[in-house]
């Protein structure tokens, strides 16, 4: 379990980190907790977790395309431009 391990990384290092995880993913499974749009774009499976009530977490299905759309709205990035982590 890697909890927000990419939070302090810039775009270039986030990409390097994702490349390393991808190499290891052939023999190891990872659970990554992140708010980083680039990291989300690189995963095989994406799950959203929300807490509508204190102490009660709910897993919600997330489609990668929808997560990208929401990240673009949050960052105010047009569909024609790449998402950034900063």
Image (cartoon, grey):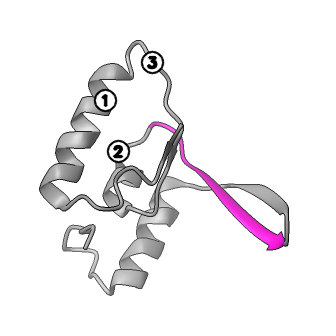
**Residue 51 spot, x, y in % from top left:** 77, 68
Left-right relation of 14 to 51? left
**Mark 3 burial class by Cα count in 10 Å: few <14, some 14-19, many 20+:** few
Q: Which mark is residue 28?
A: 3
Left-right relation of 73 to 45? left
| Residue 57 placement: quadrant | bottom right
Disc 2 to disc 3, how far (Cα)?
Answer: 16 Å
Q: Is residue 54 magenta?
A: no
Q: Earlier in the sequence, mark 2 or mark 1?
A: 1
Dot 1 corresponds to which residue?
22
Q: Are marks 3 and 1 in contact (CB under 8 Å)?
A: no
Q: Which mark is residue 42?
A: 2
Q: Are marks 2 and 1 in contact (CB under 8 Å)?
A: yes
Which segment is the magenta one?
44-53
Q: Earlier in the sequence, mark 2 or mark 3?
A: 3
Does the magenta stretch mainly form a helix, a strand or a loop?
Answer: strand
Disc 2 to disc 1, how far (Cα)?
Answer: 8 Å
Secondary element type, mark 2: loop
Frontmost residue, 24 versus 40: 24
Q: Is residue 47 magenta?
A: yes
| Residue 69 placement: quadrant | bottom left
| Residue 71 placement: quadrant | bottom left
Q: Is residue 53 above or below residue 13?
A: below
**Residue 56 spot, x, y in % from top left:** 86, 62
């Amino acid at each position: 379990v890697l909890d927000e391990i990419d939070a302090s990384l810039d775009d270039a290092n986030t990409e390097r980190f994702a490349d390393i995880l991808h190499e290891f993913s052939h023999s190891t499974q990872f659970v990554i907790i992140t708010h980083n749009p680039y990291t989300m774009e690189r995963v095989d499976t994406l799950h959203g977790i929300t807490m509508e009530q204190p102490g009660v977490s709910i897993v919600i299905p997330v489609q990668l395309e929808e997560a990208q759309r929401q990240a673009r709205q949050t960052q105010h990035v047009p569909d024609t431009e790449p998402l950034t982590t900063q």
